[in-house]
């Protein structure tokens, strides 16, 4: 039971990170119907940016207050990563809008390869270790064999994800930007005729997706204290799995899917074998798509004849 | 009344629901052999849904679709086949299929029901000729020894393929597209695409051809040509036609039997003349009850 | 003329403005990922090194590039040249170009050998000839699935892996020869193609791509973790080398290729034999694909790509049609895989990553879906292009001794994928040749050809 509780806490933490990345996938897929393959690498890039800002603040500027450092790194990473994703959309995807369906997909795969190798070239291929932050543990239950603990950074991740989800839920449901996004999802041509700037709406979608990925990236570095250039692919695919599982296009679905994937992966690793945890996640992806293509919270699509 | 004495397709208590929406409700009708049967009704009456059930694109929620590819099936035979749970029965009297039990491609291949689509579905990147050859896929596939004989260029396959080209050629002539045989189907003008789609459907050698609004978007001359084509297909006697149409001139001129749907239920069924005069049809179909309006509509219909 | 002159200064000003914006954006993007490099010191602590010089150089390059692009683009608009595309000049000679190409491929190793001697030729025949031909073959195989049937497969490398491991395991554990393993590998891969193809039949487009990607990763993860079967990360080594129909290419006086033909031993013999082996395999793939396109099954694949619903209405069983496409594509990947194993003498899961799948898919899409010649051109461009980086020693003279162009190989490869898609979204050869004709074989413009939905 204690072991179960401890795994549950880890699973929720991991799932929150997946959920944050998944929102980026789900929003982009919703609005332009494309799997943004580079999104996992944008996440990885954001983690690097947060890590370097952290190092600049602590080593070069000598800032000692940890919350200040963490918050600055987070916001800095959100801004710079958003600029990256905006540029990527502008250069690699926008010229291909409305063209051959496979072209943006190939372009996105190319961008994914480009980003991970770019980081490898400019930052070197080795792991970048910094120490994890906010590692103080709170004992929440004194078990028979060991205490069940939750670390500050785990609390920050779960609470942060919940707050962000609420904020973006509000943004999409209640604001004019959200309406514009939903209109573009339904019918971009009609939306354009009604005076919605479709390009701008898509750009903002990419910016929001990147900002959320940057939050995930910063929290990832904070939690695990290490990052390398190839860290984008697997979390990227898993986050996409989460988006599909939750129902692509659905924001709460993305987070729900993220939590489910995080939990399954953690429990699989905890109770069966860590070696095959990726197989578990990928199998869920396949099974979901085959038997429940519209996901848990998505709308079913009826085949039009 | 051929649809009563020699029915090709008998639809019994067909119901189709999508979630909470009932598109077709407890619908029964027959399609007569060698008839042109028209299914009409206002937009959203469920006509295309009926088509999709007949051609296997939807699996009906309830109901039975019995097709006698040849012969006349007695109701006992149909009931017997229904009870067995099988999809096909061959008896002395009839070659009987239960369409609701078959996937779409088998309905086309075994029961020989062909169809066209409301928004034309040609293989637009393939040539006109290729479209007609693809339609003869199953026959050619068997002749190619499921690819093995074809791969080594067996003469029997080469001969069979030449025959397929001849079939395609004869259809090209009938739809006046011989000189465009090597052009991509997507580049044909709209009216020619409609004709090609019908010819392609005919290449599977169907007993029943379902046409979803064949005259939509055609100009009067093309519409007249279409009527000619459909009549000539019927007069050959091998294929019966079942069509959805909004263009009343087409419906009244060529059909032998008209079925009227509204809100998923049948409101009239009979020969064109009796349907045309049915006040219920006029009221429901055009949503008018005013006497004066009614007269206008009648005048319009009888044109 | 007058208007152009008066417009020029403002055009330049606009260009400069665009340039400044781009430069500022570049400066923002560079922070801090280029400005600082974090490297671990001896204590495994990260230490920052600033690189403002490099950063400023990049900003300057971006500025100049943006200004030039702006000026170039506005020039095109000012002239408003409308290009009228006539029929291809090469069209009547396609047949001859093909024959000439095959002839060139056959004499290629001998020409290289005469020009460079056996030492220099080894690298060229191996790195360019064999390497590119492997990708041509894989591209042709995947072309059946993606280009003809329109099924987007991102896990194609899994079948390549099945082929490679089939040969590796069958030869090391059971001592079977390459010529027996080759068909077995193809059959096994085709079987896996059907096994993996079956559950995903209902999926379309990007979803299909993602699930096939997942299958590819599952197979790779299993190869990594099931050590009893595949020896895990370490892979399988000392796989028997290719023999010349029983005669090994060894440096020995008895029973070897060189002793049998009474020639001096040289490692180039094996490489040239491998070259002809892969050339034969690739041309077989091509030949079979061209034949299949003209058979009912091939037409059904293309019809499936054009419109699946129409196919069903014509009585075509889309399930078996899709499965045969998967199986056929997988089979050729299996052949290529066992060739890979016999060439390397070593296989490990490292060789079958997602990047390989996306490389092959990029070759197919860039070549122009369904175009056999396009695949060749794209493979030469993408594989040959990145291989050639190894040859650019002179760059060291410009960028200093520490500069290693090979380091940038994958970075440039990724960028090339993006740029090529922007340049030609429908691929190098986007037109389609009809499989049958009545009067005249006319190529069909890519604009009419559908890319498939599943």
Image (cartoon, rainbow, N blue to C red):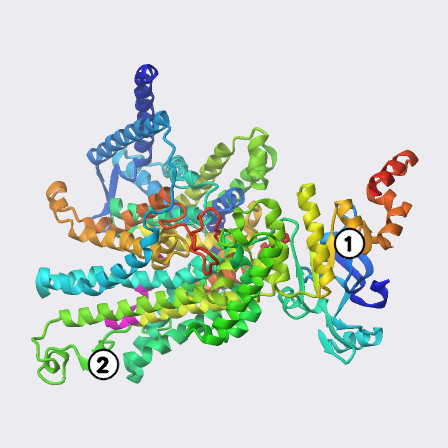
* Contact? badges 2 and 1 (CB < 8 Å): no
Residue placed most toward the observer, A297 or C451? C451
* Rendered location of residue C315, percent (x, y): 61, 65
Residue A264 higher or lower than C184, as above or below: above
Q: Residue furthest right?
A: B291
Please give the residue where the numbered disc 2 appears in the rendered image: C245
| Residue C404 in view of the camera | yes
The answer to whether A101 is drawn above or below residue B27 in the figure is above
Q: Main secondary structure of the magenta part?
A: helix
Closer to the camera in the image, C287 or A203: C287
Relative to B220, C193 lies left or right: left
Subunit that carries the residue with mark 1? B
- Tell me the distance, in whole angstroms, between the alpha carbons under discs 2 and 1: 70 Å
Q: Which quadrant would the C terminus of chain B be assigned to in this image?
A: top right
Residue C215, position as x, y percentages in the image:
44, 64
Q: Is residue B152 above or below residue A110?
A: below
Judged from the image, the secondary structure of the residue bearing numbered disc 2 is: loop
Judged left or right of residue C97, residue B22 is right
**On the image, numbered disc 1 is attached to which residue?**
B38
Q: Is residue C349 magenta?
A: yes
- Residue shown at 71%/75% (left/top)? B88
Q: Are marks 2 and 1 on the same chain?
A: no
């Amino acid at each position: 039971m204690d072991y179960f509780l401890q795994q549950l806490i880890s699973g929720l933490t991991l799932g929150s990170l997946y959920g944050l990345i998944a929102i980026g996938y789900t929003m982009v897929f919703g609005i332009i119907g494309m799997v943004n393959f580079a999104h996992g690498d944008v996440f990885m890039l954001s983690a690097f940016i947060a890590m370097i800002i952290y190092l600049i603040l602590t080593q070069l500027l000598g800032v000692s207050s940890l919350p200040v450092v963490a918050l600055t790194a987070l916001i800095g990473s959100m801004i710079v990563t958003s600029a990256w994703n905006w540029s990527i959309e502008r250069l690699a995807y926008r010229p291909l809008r409305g063209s051959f369906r496979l072209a943006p997909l190939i372009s996105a795969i190319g961008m994914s390869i480009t980003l991970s190798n770019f980081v490898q070239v400019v930052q070197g291929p080795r792991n970048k270790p910094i120490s994890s932050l906010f590692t103080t543990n709170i004992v929440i239950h004194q078990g028979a064999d060991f205490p069940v603990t939750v670390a500050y950074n785990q609390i920050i991740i779960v609470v942060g994800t919940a707050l962000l989800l609420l904020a973006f839920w509000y943004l999409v449901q209640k604001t004019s930007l959200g309406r514009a996004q939903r209109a573009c999802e339904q019918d971009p041509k009609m939306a354009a005729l009604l005076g919605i700037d479709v390009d701008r709406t898509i750009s903002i979608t990419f910016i929001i997706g990147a900002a959320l990925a940057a939050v995930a990236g910063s929290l990832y570095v904070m939690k695990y204290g290490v990052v390398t250039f190839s860290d984008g692919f697997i979390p990227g695919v898993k986050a996409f799995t989460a988006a599909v599982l939750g129902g692509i296009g659905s924001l709460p679905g993305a987070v729900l899917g993220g939590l489910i994937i995080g939990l399954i992966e953690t429990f699989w690793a905890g109770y069966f074998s860590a070696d095959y945890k990726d197989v578990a996640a990928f199998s869920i992806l396949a099974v979901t798509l085959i038997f429940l293509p519209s996901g848990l919270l998505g709308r079913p699509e009826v085949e039009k004849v | 009344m051929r649809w009563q004495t020699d029915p090709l397709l008998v639809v019994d208590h067909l119901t189709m629901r999508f979630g909470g929406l009932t598109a077709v409700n407890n619908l029964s009708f027959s399609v007569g052999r060698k008839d042109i049967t028209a299914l009409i009704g206002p937009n959203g009456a469920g006509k295309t849904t009926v088509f999709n059930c007949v051609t296997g694109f939807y699996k009906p929620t309830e109901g039975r679709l019995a097709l006698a590819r040849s012969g006349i099936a007695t109701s006992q035979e149909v009931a017997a086949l229904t009870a067995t749970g099988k999809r096909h029965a061959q008896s002395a009297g009839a070659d009987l299929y239960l369409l609701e039990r078959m996937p779409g491609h088998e309905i086309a291949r075994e029961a020989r029901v062909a169809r066209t689509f409301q928004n034309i579905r040609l293989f637009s990147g393939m040539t006109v000729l290729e479209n007609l050859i693809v339609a003869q896929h199953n026959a050619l596939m068997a002749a190619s020894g499921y690819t093995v004989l074809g791969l080594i260029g067996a003469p029997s396959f080469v001969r069979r393929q030449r025959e397929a080209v001849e079939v395609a050629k004869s259809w090209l002539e009938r739809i006046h597209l011989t000189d465009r045989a090597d052009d991509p189907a997507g580049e044909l003008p709209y009216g020619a695409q409609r004709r090609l789609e019908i010819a392609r459907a005919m290449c599977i050698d169907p007993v029943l051809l379902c046409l979803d609004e064949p005259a939509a978007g055609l100009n009067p001359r093309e519409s007249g040509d279409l009527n000619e084509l459909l009549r000539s297909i019927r007069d050959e006697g091998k294929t019966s036609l079942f069509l959805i149409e909004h263009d009343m001139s087409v419906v009244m001129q060529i059909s032998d039997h008209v079925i009227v749907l509204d809100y998923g239920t049948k409101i009239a069924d009979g020969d064109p003349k009796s349907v045309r005069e049915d006040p219920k049809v006029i009221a429901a179909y055009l949503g008018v009850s005013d006497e004066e309006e009614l007269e206008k509509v009648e005048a319009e219909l009888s044109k | 003329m007058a208007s152009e002159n008066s417009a020029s200064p403002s055009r330049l000003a606009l260009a400069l403005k665009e340039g400044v914006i781009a430069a500022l954006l570049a400066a923002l993007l560079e922070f801090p990922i280029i400005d600082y490099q974090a490297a671990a010191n001896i204590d495994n602590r990260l230490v920052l090194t600033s690189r403002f010089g490099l950063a400023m150089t990049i900003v300057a390059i971006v500025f100049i590039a943006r200004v030039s692009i702006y000026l170039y683009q506005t020039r095109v608009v000012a002239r408003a040249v409308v290009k009228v595309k006539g029929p291809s000049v090469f069209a009547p000679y396609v047949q001859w170009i093909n024959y000439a190409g095959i002839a060139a491929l056959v004499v290629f190793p001998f020409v290289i050998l005469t020009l460079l001697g056996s030492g220099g030729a080894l690298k060229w025949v191996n790195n360019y000839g064999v390497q590119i031909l492997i990708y041509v073959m894989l591209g042709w195989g995947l072309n059946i699935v993606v280009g003809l049937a329109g099924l987007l497969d991102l896990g194609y490398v899994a079948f390549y892996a099945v082929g490679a491991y089939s040969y590796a395991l069958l030869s090391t554990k059971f001592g079977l020869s390459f010529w027996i393993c080759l068909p077995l590998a193809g059959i096994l891969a085709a079987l896996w193609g059907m096994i993996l193809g079956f559950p995903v039949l209902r999926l379309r487009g990007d979803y299909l791509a993602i699930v096939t990607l997942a299958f590819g990763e599952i197979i790779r993860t299993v190869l990594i973790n099931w050590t009893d079967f595949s020896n895990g990360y370490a892979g399988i080594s000392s796989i028997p080398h290719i023999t010349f129909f029983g005669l090994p290419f060894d440096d020995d006086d008895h029973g070897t290729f060189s002793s049998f033909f009474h020639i001096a031993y040289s490692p180039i013999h094996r490489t040239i034999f491998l070259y002809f082996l892969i050339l034969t395999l690739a041309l077989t793939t091509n030949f079979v694909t061209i034949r299949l396109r003209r058979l009912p099954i091939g037409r059904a694949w293309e019809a499936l790509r054009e419109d699946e619903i129409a196919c069903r209405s014509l009585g075509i069983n889309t399930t078996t049609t899709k499965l045969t496409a998967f199986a056929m594509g997988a089979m050729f990947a299996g052949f290529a895989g066992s060739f890979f194993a016999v060439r390397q003498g070593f296989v490990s899961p490292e060789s079958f990553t997602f990047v390989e799948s996306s490389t092959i898919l990029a070759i197919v899409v860039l070549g122009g879906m369904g175009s056999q010649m396009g695949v060749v051109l794209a493979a030469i461009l993408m594989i040959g292009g990145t291989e050639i980086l190894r040859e650019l020693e002179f760059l060291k003279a410009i960028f200093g001794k520490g500069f290693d162009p090979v380091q940038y190989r994958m970075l440039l490869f990724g960028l090339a994928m993006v740029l090529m898609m922007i340049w030609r979204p429908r691929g190098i050869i986007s037109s389609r040749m009809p499989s049958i004709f009545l009067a005249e074989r006319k190529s069909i413009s890519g604009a009419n050809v559908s890319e498939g939905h599943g």
